Image: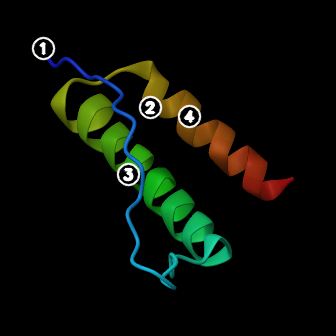
Amino acid sequence: QCTLREVEIKPVYRVGEQSKMKVMKVIPRVSRLLIKSFFIRLWRKYLFKDFHPLFIFYNYAFLALLIT
């Protein structure tokens, strides 16, 4: 079990400093990481660890999406 709590933290910058994080660079990288991790989890959990039909359905839907 894991308990999560959302804690508000204000960023602290010195005078004249600002974030160097570029949103248009971060969004594609994080999205790719999340999608990749999702499919890795599908393979490990639903194919190798304990087979489940969800594995087949998710992969079939993904392939159908790519084809159309």
**Nearer to the camera, 11 or 36:** 11
Q: How many marks?
A: 4
Query: Which of the two marks, 2 or 3, is nearer to us in this view?
Result: 3
The residue shown at (29%, 23%) is 5
3 left or right, relative to 9? left
Disc marking residue 37: 3
Q: Are marks 3 and 1 in contact (CB under 8 Å)?
A: no
* SS state under label 3: helix
**Residue 49, above or below 36:** above
**Disc 2/disc 3 C-alpha distance (Å):** 14 Å
Decide: marks 2, 4 in contact (CB < 8 A)? yes
Residue 39 location, x and y as percent? 42, 47
Q: Which residue is mark 2?
A: 55
Q: Quadrant of residue 59?
A: top right
Asked if residue 60 is positioned above or below residue 50 in the image, the reply reads below
Q: What's the amino acid at mark 2? A: Phe
